[in-house]
């Protein structure tokens, strides 16, 4: 496996525009990850850390974000979600919809 | 008379010490080339190993684009092992696998991801795993 190096925390994932439907990145640190434009339909991100992640245009339809950390309304309103997207408990779907409409 | 005995003992001890020093020096002279030979052999072995790994790496990179799933999968496993054995190559392999995902010619519709994509994601996830203190 690609073991965590000492400098691992400085490295972040860059899968912008990638096709990663139904993949499982549960428990991953996606801090500052660039996922812009990626198709993560039905992907699983349980307990992943999204601090600073770029989700502009990321397709998260049906994605499972249960327990995902550090997600903001700002980030999610840039992403494409649907009624099947499972949001973390601290994200209010109504507020998210409102934020998306205001954009 | 006792002075002579004491003096002869001192001379003898000095001679013994000198002989021991000369012996140690000669032994070191003999061992030194052996040690440098061992070092050179070790360096050569390391260089050969690295050349072998570089070849494996290059071949695996080429095989990632192969039309045959088994070949692609084997390439991913080779890269995984290289990353494990050579931590200094871990970063380039991490970048390479992300670049492979970004390349844009992957589309398996709404099906489950093919096993090569699953393995790549597994490798990336292991690298990005959150370690709670």
Image (cartoon, coloured by chain):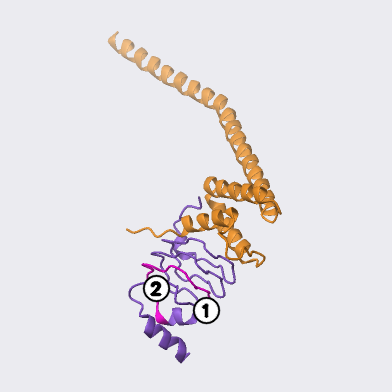
What is the letter of the purple chain?
A
Secondary structure of the residue carrying tag 1 is loop
Q: Residue at x 59, y 29 (%)?
A: B33
Of the residues tagged 1 and 2, which is closer to the observer? 2
User: Would you place residue A23 above or below residue A103 in this image?
Assistant: above
- Residue B87 located left or right of residue A65: right
- Residue A69 falls within the magenta-colored stretch: yes
Q: Are marks 1 and 2 in contact (CB under 8 Å)?
A: no
- Residue furthest to the top: B1
Q: Which residues are magenta?
A: A56-73
| Residue annotated with mark 2 | A87
Q: Chain of mark 1?
A: A
Q: Do the dots labelled 1 and 2 sit on one chain?
A: yes
What is the letter of the orange chain?
B
Q: Chain of mark 2?
A: A
Secondary structure of the residue carrying tag 2 is loop
Between B55 and A1, the one nearer to me in the picture? A1
Residue A56: numbered disc: 1
**What secondary structure predominates along the stretch shown in magenta?**
loop
């Amino acid at each position: 496996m690609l073991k965590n190096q000492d400098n691992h925390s400085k490295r972040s994932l860059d899968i912008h525009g990638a096709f990663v439907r139904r993949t499982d990145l549960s428990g991953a640190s996606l801090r500052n990850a660039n996922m812009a434009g990626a198709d993560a339909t039905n992907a699983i991100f349980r307990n992943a850390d999204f601090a600073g992640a770029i989700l502009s245009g990321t397709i998260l339809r049906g994605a499972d974000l249960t327990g995902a950390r550090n997600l903001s309304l700002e980030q999610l309103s840039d992403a494409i979600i649907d009624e099947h997207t499972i949001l973390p408990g601290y994200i209010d779907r109504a507020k998210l919809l409102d934020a998306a409409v205001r954009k | 008379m006792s002075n002579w005995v004491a003096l002869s003992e001192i001379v003898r001890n000095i001679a013994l010490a000198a002989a021991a020093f000369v012996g140690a020096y000669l032994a070191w002279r003999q061992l030194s080339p052996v040690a440098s030979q061992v070092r050179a052999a070790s360096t050569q072995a390391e260089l050969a190993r690295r050349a072998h790994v570089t070849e494996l790496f290059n071949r695996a990179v080429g095989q990632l684009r192969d039309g045959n799933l088994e070949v692609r999968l084997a390439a991913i496993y080779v890269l995984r092992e290289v990353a494990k054995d050579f931590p200094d190559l871990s970063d380039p392999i991490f970048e390479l696998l992300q670049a492979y995902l970004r390349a844009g010619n992957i589309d398996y519709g709404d099906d489950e991801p093919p096993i090569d994509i699953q393995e790549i994601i597994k490798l990336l996830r292991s690298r990005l795993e959150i370690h709670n203190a």
